[in-house]
Amino acid sequence: LQRLVHPREPSEASLVSRLEVVTLPSHPLGDLPVRSCAQELQLPVHEWPHTGPAGQFDVGVVASFGRLLSEELILQFPYGVLNIHPSCLPRWRGPAPIVHTVLHGDKVTGVTIMEIRPKRFDVGPIIKQEEFAVPPCCTAKELEEILAKMGANLLISVLKNLPESLQNKREQPKEGVTFAPKISIAKSCIKWEEQTAAQIIQLHRAIGSMFPLQTLWKGTTVKLLDLVEVDNIPGLSDQVLNDSGAAPGSLLYHKASKMLIARCR
């Protein structure tokens, strides 16, 4: 929204003459970021399923909206409805592409501007796509911030020449389709006997900002907020745990580093 309202270049100044926002109903735990942003920018806001005045806009744009759009609604926009999706489709279709990108250790991700189709999520033609090398040790939250900026810039580049962009759209490949289902809090429960240290660290980077990893300690749930692999601690190695004969899930206290060390698979 900020990118559409505050152009960075003279060529973008007349790109958008009218902008209104549709959001989902407010969440009990707090207002939605897009609603707060729209209100700060003094934009008209409509609450789904109300979508504002029909037939008065050229193109619609959605990002992480999470609701299927009807064909009737899509046809109200002469240029259709575009979706900003934070992955290189068809990889990671679904509601949690960034989390699954980090969780599966993808080296490359990106942003896709695609055309919305009714009845199914993330299957429409690709209008424009840009790849991005995932930084080492990147968390999902950090990657989200990077891809949000990429997505905004990519959207502007599409809108600058929308008719030509739509003419050059292409169907998604049938190969390489993967799905990114929503993550539940159950995923945050560590399975020491099944997961390696690398897998647990990767899980922490993927979901730690939403659901801190947790384990049981003498019957009490303990949340783990800061994790590091033993090999990354100077003067310490897996040999410490190997020498102790510790079973997965066992804890040792390392006095020199003042850290608790947990045995993984």
Image: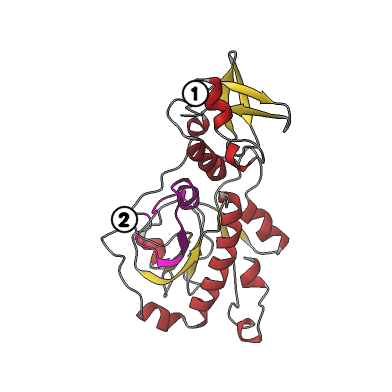
Up-down relation of residue 180 to residue 111 (above or below): above
Report the mark closest to the observer, 1 or 2.
1
Q: Amino acid at mark 1?
A: Pro
In the displayed structure image, the side of residue 91 where residue 231 appears, left or right: right
User: Where is the N terminus found, in terms of image quarters?
Assistant: bottom right
Residue at horizontal 46 percent and vertical 60 percent from the top: 109
Q: Residue at x 35, y 75 (%)?
A: 169
Q: Position of residue 156 (x, y in %)?
A: 55, 75
Is 105 within the magenta?
yes
Counting from the top left corner in percent of width and height, residue 219 is at: 58, 13
Q: Nearer the viewer, residue 17 or 113?
A: 113
How far apart are the two marked residues, 1 and 2, measured between alpha carbons?
35 Å
Does the segment drawn in magenta span residue 208? no
**Label 1–label 2 contact, CB within 8 A:** no
Span highlighted in magenta in the image: 92-121
Quarter where residue 82 is shown? bottom left
Q: Which mark is residue 177?
A: 2
Q: Residue at x 50, y 54 (%)?
A: 64
| 228 vs 154, nearest the viewer | 228
Q: How many marks?
A: 2
**Which residue bears the numbered disc 1?**
248
